[in-house]
Amino acid sequence: MTEQNNNVAAQEEVTSQFSLQRIYVKDLSFEAPKSPEIFREDWSPNVEMDLNTRQRSLEGDFYEVVLTITVTVKTGEDVAFIAEVQQAGIFLIQGLDAASQGHALGAFCPSILFPYARETLDSLVVRGSFPALMLAPVNFDALYAQELQRMQASGTAQA
């Protein structure tokens, strides 16, 4: 009987699968509207960062997850630069229940994409002749939990 239970458990583990297929930049933008005048001003940046994720089902059990990060840096009232990246990935997700799949798409996949997006933005900003942009890590699990709470409070069904 124990062997039969072990075989059933082993079969269940095989049916659940998560794998990264590809990571790529979907869109990239950099604007420095006050260049070159901004380079002569005192550098006291105010950094604003907006995060957004979206996902869509591709064929079969493949999903595209897109992490969008928009960084706006101002010095005083002047916009020094705006940098945006849409870092995307294709993931194979099979055999997960709805809650686990939602967590994978809403938190785990963006956590995988974030370091790539952070490096891309940093490189882009340095190429614009600005100081390196070292974005702090993001807790996507906490953001996902907050979004679930917000949706439950407003009575919105999880997408």
Image (cartoon, grey):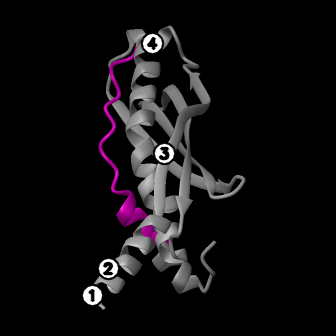
Residue at mark 4 to residue at mark 2: CA–CA distance: 56 Å
Residue at mark 1 to residue at mark 4: CA–CA distance: 61 Å
Closer-to-camera residue (56/13): 13
Which residue is labeled 1 in the image? 2
Closer-to-camera residue (69/113): 113
Q: Secondary structure at mark 4?
A: helix
Please say if the residues under marks 1 and 2 sit with CB atoms less than 8 Å apart. yes
- Amino acid under disc 2: Asn
Hey, which quadrant is residue 108 in on the image?
Answer: bottom left
Which residue is labeled 2 in the image? 6
Foreground: disc 3 or disc 2: 2
Q: Does the image show residue 85?
A: no
Q: What's drawn in magenta, residue-wise?
A: 130-147
Hey, which quadrant is residue 33 in on the image?
Answer: top right
Foreground: disc 1 or disc 3: 1
Quadrant assignment for the C terminus: bottom right
Magenta run includes residue 144: yes
